[in-house]
Image (spheres, grey):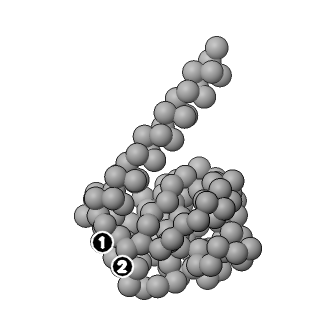
Amino acid sequence: MLKVVVIDANAISRNLLTSVLVDGGFDVVGDASSNSAGLAAMIKLKPQMVCIDIGPADAEGFEKLDTLRAGLPKSLLFMVSGSFDPATVQTAVERGVHGFIVKPFKSATVLGTIRKTVIKVAQQHRARAEQDAE
């Protein structure tokens, strides 16, 4: 069972996503607002997966991704938002985001997105390991 933290400035969104994840079999070990104190607290929990709504897709929002990536280099990082434009997606991927969860939450979609991303990342790691063995 993956240890997960949920970071979102909106308490209702945090609670909804937490419910979806718990019902899907994930171990949600913490949740916080997206301020710097919340980010620091969540990094200390050493989760294997982070779901974060960075707020506006601006320099300050992307700095939150950089902070998480620096503190949790091996964690799966999912960006949560009500909308994604191509530039935001590209910038997020460049900053280490593995997947995207769209608001409003639909349980099957959220869990399917996470499952597909975990499989994709596992396949990438396996392929790298095989290349390194050659």
Tell me what residue is drawn at x 36 percent, y 79 percent. Answer: 15
Q: Residue 110 falls in which quadrant of the image?
A: bottom left
Q: Is residue 130 above or below residue 87?
A: above
Tell me residue 69's x, y (percent): 65, 59
Tell me what residue is drawn at x 68 percent, y 69 percent. Answer: 62
Look at label 2 and name its amino acid.
Asn
Q: How many marks?
A: 2
In the drawing, does residue 55 fall left or right of residue 111? right
Tell me residue 99's x, y (percent): 51, 55
Q: Residue 19: which numbered mark, if any? A: 1
Q: Residue 130 falls in which quadrant of the image?
A: top right
Tell me residue 24's x, y (percent): 28, 59
Q: Is residue 98 visible?
A: yes
Q: Label 1 crowding class (10 Å Cα cut-off): few <14, some 14-19, many 20+? A: some
Q: Mark 2 points at which residue?
A: 15
Q: Label 2 crowding class (10 Å Cα cut-off): few <14, some 14-19, many 20+? A: some
Q: Is residue 10 above or below residue 5?
A: below
Tell me what residue is drawn at x 38 percent, y 66 percent. Answer: 28
Q: Quick one: SS at disc 2?
A: helix
Tell me what residue is drawn at x 59 percent, y 74 percent. Answer: 54
Q: Quick one: SS at disc 1?
A: helix
Q: Residue 39: which numbered mark, if any? A: none
Look at label 1 and name its amino acid.
Ser
Q: Is residue 118 above or below residue 20?
A: above
Determine whether label 1 and label 2 are within 8 Å by CB.
yes
